[in-house]
Amino acid sequence: MTISHPTTPLVAILRGLQPAEAVDVAKVLYNAGFRALEVPLNRPGALECIAAIVKLNLPDTLVGGGTMLSVAHVEAVYEAGGRLLVSPNCNPAAIRRAAELGMYCAPGVATPTEAFAALDAGAHALKLFPAEMVGHGGLKAMLSVVPAGTPMWPVGGVTPETMAGWKKAGATGFGIGGALFTPGVSLEELGERAAAFVNAWRALAA
């Protein structure tokens, strides 16, 4: 099964998203240029949010779950229509199951051992987490040993201003949480934040 990478490799981490606002939030992010939306499962209502966003049928957009820690999480997100796995850790069983189901897998890794275990299990991209701990040097070292072309996405503390340093170190995308979406943020403010990230990425990718 061939799975394509997100056309814009910025993952919106929507921790604390409420079902009643999921559709409006997703539309704002999509219109700003985001093409990967993740709703972490460690907050109430996550599966309902995923199902609501999936029903929008946003073109070329990956929708799925974050903080996916088990095979049960994978199957629940898949049943809700999600096709993206994001996790803070490397759980080979969860990655394998998601890959079997045709989901795009971006598990969290912080060491070469975890990186290779994730790739062996079927990961399509590696979420470098926590990015602040690994640092630019850690990313460069990781890239020197993983297969060429492996997507590496720092997550944790990323802002439009810090993206350039990570890109120079070899990052090919980002997961963006609190600097983008926080519970209670207005749609207008969310749109402004989203545009800042997308514009920064496009400038770096040009």
Image: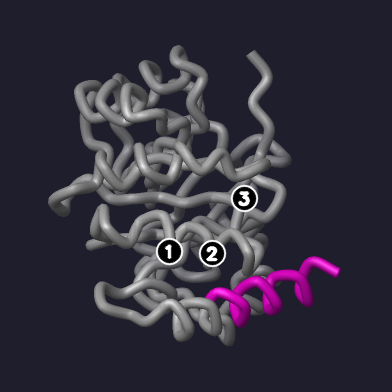
Dot 3 or dot 2: first in sequence order is 2
Name the front one of labels 3 and 1.
Answer: 1
Q: Residue 25 carries which label?
A: 1
The image shows residue 39 at horizontal and vertical percentages of 33, 50
Residue 17 is covered by the magenta coloring: no
The span shown in magenta is 194-206
Q: Which of 46 and 28 is in front in this view?
A: 28
C-alpha distance separating marks 3 and 2: 30 Å
Do the CB atoms of the residues marked 2 and 1 lie less than 8 Å apart? Answer: yes
Colour treatment of the image: one colour
Residue kind at label 2, given as amino acid type: Leu
Q: In which quarter of the image is residue 97?
A: top left
Label total for image:
3
Q: Crowding at label 2, few (<14), some or many (≥20) Cα neighbours within 10 Å? A: many
Q: Nearer the viewer, residue 4 or 194?
A: 194
| 21 relative to 35 in the view: left or right | left
The image shows residue 98 at horizontal and vertical percentages of 40, 22
Compared to residue 159, the image places residue 99 above or below, namely above
Q: Is mark 2 on a helix, strand or loop?
A: helix
Residue kind at label 3, given as amino acid type: Leu
Residue for point 38% across, 67% down? 177
The image shows residue 201 at horizontal and vertical percentages of 69, 71
Residue kind at label 1, given as amino acid type: Val
